[in-house]
Image: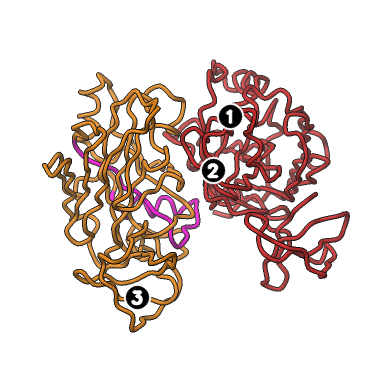
Chain colours: A red, B orange
Amino acid sequence: MKFGRFEQQGRIFYGTVEGGEVSELEGSILGSYRATPRKHALASLKTLVPCLPPNFYCAGLNYAAHIEWANRRTGGNRKPPEKADIGYRSANALAATGEAIVIPADSPGPVQFEGELVAVIGKIARNLSEKDALSCVLGYTLGNDVSERTWQKQDRTLWRAKNCDTFKPMGPFIATGIDPMKLTITIKVNGATAAEYGTEKMLFSAQHYIAQISRYMTLQPGDVVWLGTDGATEPDLKDGDTVEVIQKDIGTLRNPVKRAKA
Amino acid sequence: MKFGRFEQQGRIFYGTVEGGEVSELEGSILGSYRATPRKHALASLKTLVPCLPPNFYCAGLNYAAHIEWANRRTGGNRKPPEKADIGYRSANALAATGEAIVIPADSPGPVQFEGELVAVIGKIARNLSEKDALSCVLGYTLGNDVSERTWQKQDRTLWRAKNCDTFKPMGPFIATGIDPMKLTITIKVNGATAAEYGTEKMLFSAQHYIAQISRYMTLQPGDVVWLGTDGATEPDLKDGDTVEVIQKDIGTLRNPVKRAKA
């Protein structure tokens, strides 16, 4: 099943998506909901970010080939992390599919994509074992962890590098019943494949990350866990580009890129 | 004026606080609200965290004497930050006044308080000048940036060190019409003053931090900006302690400390 969050003339609702049709739901997919008889053409609705996360967790470095590429590109010597320490992003930066990624006028660049699998938490959870970790997951969506590499290097934190408004596209839908460790994620820039990887190469599995978080933190419905990206994250993004993060069961997260005027 | 958020038999509402009395409001202090004729004894209500932040910003290092103390205590050589880079905390960790700070069973310690002033954003804001920065602030509350120092040193991020459930007490109330740069913050442990400082010693002012954030991020009603702590953060907290963060216009944020059983 595929859930989405939609807007029609100012009214916001959840729905299930099948092909080009949305069946409207009453209530929230993060609490309780029921079907309605109302159907809409997907193209007639604005697709919103599929949830508004109370907590926004991310894995950061979680694939070896991405770390190796970053070291080659920056002359760095970063080692793979020894354990699944959790990073954070901030909800201000979320953008829906179709919305522009806006590069700030003063960005020295480069600005790059990082296409990621995202676990969406469906129920309150604490102290889960790795074996049971996915029991709290509603489903999976896609994220683009857009990154300003100069600020990432120069600032004391990742605030501007990763959390500028629009730097966190997420969506388009939440797919249920898929195995997060057996997915192929493809990133395209202007229609050409820029990167493609399998989620089985995660250094720490979705299960491991979620179990680790739940040892110290109560997971909440709507929380998201971004699971990292693999490989190179080139070409650099520039005004006029379109970037897509694609997984066949979830759909295509597609965002144009604009540069703000000074 | 002092705003609070309260619960009575499962019903949640905002109110204004005067002495021991709460005047109930209808609506939200983060949107629109109006007075009601309903009055309550403050002691008859559960005081909640005064807002649930969509974005949880923090200054991190923002006072010279705290950095000097931390360097002495840890043998470190941390310099004062050169600019106001923003950090993040996570809403799962919030705790209301009166609720226990729970030290995880596997914490090597020490666990320490950091008493802070917190700006609460009241309206949507972007690109504010320093001069106008406080125009988006609804008022000020208090925060205790509880920190597990071993994890702070050992982990790649501050996730467990700063964001375990209950590690972010915030409250008790939001005071309006006060100058954030002219306040005295007192921290007491078991009734004895452990630290006291004036907010005029911030390295980067509340105005500067808020203006900086707003250059890249849209501030949202309910967002909070924690502004850092000064001086030493001792004695270490242990099971059975009570820690208070006090500012006379805002009130007293008081939390007992417990250690979880293994």
Question: What is the CA distance from the residue labelled 3 to the residue labelled 2?
Answer: 31 Å
Of tags 3 and 1, which is closer to the observer?
A: 1
- The residue type indicated by label 3 comes to Glu
- The residue type indicated by label 1 comes to Ser
The picture places residue B96, in percent across and down from the top left corner, at 34, 53
Q: Residue furthest bottom?
A: B37
The picture places residue B90, in percent across and down from the top left corner, at 45, 44
**SS at mark 3 in the image:** strand
State left or right for residue A107 relative to residue A156: right
**Mark 2 or mark 1, which has the lower sequence index?**
1
Q: Is residue A129 above or below residue A98?
A: above
Say which of A111 and A2 sits in front.
A2
- Range covered by the magenta-colored residues: B205-231
The picture places residue B94, in percent across and down from the top left corner, at 40, 48
**Pointer 2 with pointer 1, Cβ within 8 A:** no
State left or right for residue B143 relative to residue A244: left
Query: Does B75 lie within the magenta span?
Result: no
- Residue drawn 45% across and 30% down? B157
Badges 3 and 1, same chain: no
Q: Quadrant of the N terminus of chain B?
A: bottom left
Q: Chain of mark 2?
A: A
Q: How many marks?
A: 3
Q: Which mark is residue B24?
A: 3
Mark 1 lies on residue: A129
Question: What is the CA distance from the residue labelled 3 to the residue labelled 1?
Answer: 43 Å
